[in-house]
Each structure stands twice: as structure tokens, then as C-alpha cells.
Image (cartoon, helix red, strand yellow):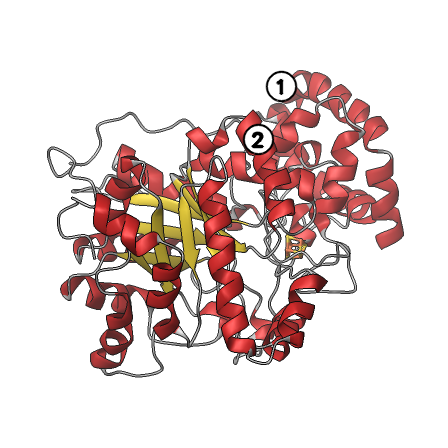
Amino acid sequence: MRSIRLWSVRHAGALEILHSLFMRVAPRLRRGVAWLGPQRVERLVAPAERTLKGLFFDCHMCGRCTLSSTGMACPMNCPKRHRNGPCGGVAADGSCEIDPGMRCVWLEGLDGSRRMTGADKFASIQPPADASLRGSSAWVRTIMGKDAVPQDPPPGHGQGHGARERGLLETACRSGRFVVTAELSPPDSADPQDQLRRATAFRGILDAVNVTDSAGANCHMSSLAASALLVADGYEPVFQVACRDRNRIAMQADILGAAALGVRNLLAITGDGVGNGDHPDARPVFDIDSVSLLEIARGMRDRGAFASGRTLAVRPDLFLGATINPFAPPFEDRLINFAKKIAAGAQFVQTQYCFDLAMLEAFMRQVRSRGLDRRCHILVGVGPLPSARTARWMLAHVPGVHIPEQILHRIEQSADQKREGVKICVELIRALRRMEGIAGVHVMAHRNENLVPGILRDSGLTQERNNTTSLPGVT
Ligand code: SF4
């Protein structure tokens, strides 16, 4: 089956011609299908479509076909059901994060799109899968003209909070000052003090604290509750929402709840596969991907409506963020993916760990040439590697992490590996401060939060902040 799927990608150009012919003929068939009865036609057509598209595309009969926009590679074969480009976990050899025996569906899609004249469609945002259409015929829907993009509800739904007051992270990003965020994983505890104690290392030195959402698919206190605890204690949290664990109903409910509790920043992530976490037996949800989540959150904020179109009484006032990974293949598609996230509403992005400045600079050259750095604040992920052993473990187990051999070698050769890891982190931050288009850094020092103040001091960021900050109440 898979070899036929790859054949389809290799012949995406010819299949595109067939698709265009079908699109031309489809409206002429509408009256006939209406006369026969769409349900009756559906009963005849759906089994044929399932067989044919199953054979050529490993089609999952999602009912809303995207093949002509995804290089003739069916995105439903992605274990995370990404409909908008690859996740950040694609391995260096192009294999899938979740199913290493399979090449990432999106690498196949990119190959296919290069063979198509409508390759620009690859950059368009695809709507999420509609569970109510599962098993139904996309051909009949196309004939009946039901795949038109849904219209946005008219603006003005719901109420805002009056004059919009920016959150502290948004204010810092707009100030032009080099911004600093750091990551805090919520505790395995029902005691709020366990969360707040660990946050004290960050007080007064950051623009915001990212609260991870069961990072690595390991269960912890919910990011919503942990973010609310930080708000109440005077911090500026970034509430992370992973699509892995909740469907669109639960995520929208959480977005409203977070905003009601004073959270002003949201980071949409797809989330790692459950196989790497402490509950590999859990059912991954992946109802929507992070691009769709951004669009939904933006719709709640700007249009005052749920994804269903139902009106909100009061809109959530949020600064929206996403993640990007310039260090994982397909490198060409990373830019497309970044642009999609901006189009979906991302105002800031945080990257995967950066240990390779040359690779980042290559990515940033393309970002700058497309002006994406002027449309979105880019915070680059950095962190101290505590030892060569941990670094090698991260390479093997953390999806999407890239650490050049020379960095590993440098730490291995050092008498004090932890100190060397901090030194490398400081050097990287200093270099990033000089790189055009970079708005700040995002420090990830898991279980080493106490190292963050020293890293910021040695890289000159604390001094810069003390000299320039006149931002009221920045954490
Ligand atoms: S690597 Fe990620 S995007 Fe690609 S197929 Fe696997 S889960 Fe999907």
C-alpha cells in the first residue's frame, strides 16, 4: 500500500491534472446528483472512493479531502493528524517522530507539491478534520459544492474589555528591547507552593514564564491551574495548550477559563506523541493541530465567537504564540509552516533549542527576506546542557532536538561539564543578541531553573534590562 502511496506523490503532477478535470466537471453533475438524491449517490460512490483512494493514497475517508493542497499525500496518515505542515519532531533522517519506520507524511507532501503547478496551495491553511464527515464521500461533497471555505462570522460579536490593555509580554515585545522568557514545568503536586517556590528563581528577571502543558506527554499539574497560580502571585505566565490531550471543545473552554483567571498569553502547540511519556497507553486526541488552534483562539479574541460560530459574551484578551523548529527537516517547509502560523494568528514564536547558530542564521536569512520577522516576534530557545550524557539522551529521546557534534565534544572534554553547558548557553545568547530579526530568547533549563539568573546576568541581559526597563510591574 505504502509503495502505491509514494507512487501517487511521484505522479502528483498527473494526478493534479485529473483533479482539475474533476473540479471542472463537478458542478455539471450537481443537478443530476440532486435529482437522484445525494444520499443514494453517496451509498454508491463512497465505497468506490474508499477503494480507489485507499489504494492510491491510503485515504482515511475524512470527508474533507486536501490531497490537491498537500502534494497528493494524505495528511490523515500523519499520526498527529496534522493538516497544516509537519510537527517539530521530524527526525534528522526525515522519519516520523511517532512512527520511526515511516517517512514524515509532510516530507512526502512537499515532494509532491514540487511536481504540481498549484504548489502555492501547499502554503494555504487547511481547516481541521470534521468528525461528523468521517467515512463520507468527499467527491459527492465537492459535486454538491459543500467544500467552500466557511465564511467568517461578521466582526463585532461578543464584547471586548473596552480599550485593550496589553499584557506585559506583548508590551515588552513591542518595546524593541531584547525579550526573555523561560520555561517552568508544573509540579507533580496538588500543593500550590510547589509551583510558586520554583518560580521564585524567575522573579524580576523575565518578561514571562512559560507554563508547559504535560511536556513530553508526562503528566503534571494542569498548565491552566499553574498559570492561574502564577498570575495570582504577580508573574506573567504563557499558558501552553497542547492539542495532544484535549479536543476543540475542551481547549476553547480552557481558553475562556484562562482569560477569566487573568492569563494574557497563549502558546499553541501540537504536543509530543504519548509514546515518549509516562502514559504510553493513553489515547492521543489530536483533534486539531496547532495552526487550527491559533485560528480558533484568534476567532474567539477578534470575532468574539467559538469555532462553531456561537457568540461569546466577553472575548478573551490574548497575545497568541506558537512554536517553530528551524532545526528539523523539511527545512524548506519550515518557512511555509512559520508563515502559516503567522497567518493563523501567531504574534510571537518560540523555537526549539538552538545549538547551531549557522543553521539558525540560514533560516533567519529566509525569514528576513520574506519579512516574517517584522510580522512576528521570534524568541529563540536556548538552555544549559548539564552534561554530555544528558545531551546525548536529549538527542535520542527529545523529538526535534539538534545538537552539533562539536558542542557535544566540547562538553565531553570539559572537566566541569555543567559549567561548560552554562558557558555555551551564555555564548549563544550573546550571539543571538546580535542576530538580525531575533526579538529575544526563551530559556529552557528543566530542573535547573536556579541556573537561569546567572545565565542572564553573564550574558548581559540583566544589566540591559535594569538599564532600559521602565515597564511597570514586569515580573
Ligand atoms: S513527524 Fe510529525 S508531522 Fe510528520 S508524520 Fe510524524 S507526527 Fe506527523
- Precedes in sequence: disc 1 or disc 2: 1
Q: Is mark 2 within 8 Å of ligand 1?
A: no
- The kind of residue tagged 1 is Arg
Name the residue carrying label 2. Answer: 124
Q: Residues within 10 Å of mark 2 (few under 14, many from 20)?
A: some
Residue sitting at the far left: 162
Instruction: Please tell me whether residue 162 is drawn above or below residue 20 in the rendered image.
Output: below
Label 1's element?
helix
Q: Which residue is depicted at the point 26% across and 26% down?
A: 155
Pair 1/2: label in front: 2
- The kind of residue tagged 2 is Ser
Residue closest to the eye, 3 or 207: 207
Q: Which residue is depicted at the point 57% across and 31% down?
A: 124
Residue 307: horizontal and vertical position, in percent?
37, 42
Image side of residue 319 versus residue 358, left or right:
left
Q: Residues within 10 Å of mark 1 (few under 14, many from 20)?
A: few
User: Which quarter of the rendering shows the C terminus?
Assistant: bottom left
Residue 179: horizontal and vertical position, in percent?
34, 47
Label 2's element?
loop
Q: Which mark is residue 343?
A: none
Quadrant location of residue 164? top left
Name the residue carrying label 1. Answer: 31
Image side of residue 5 versus residue 147, left or right:
right
Image side of residue 292 versus residue 333, left or right:
left
For the residues bearing labels 1 and 2, Cβ distance under 8 angstroms: no
Q: Is residue 115 visible?
A: yes
Q: Is residue 64 visible?
A: no
User: Which quarter of the rendering shows the N terminus?
Assistant: bottom right
Residue 109: horizontal and vertical position, in percent?
73, 41
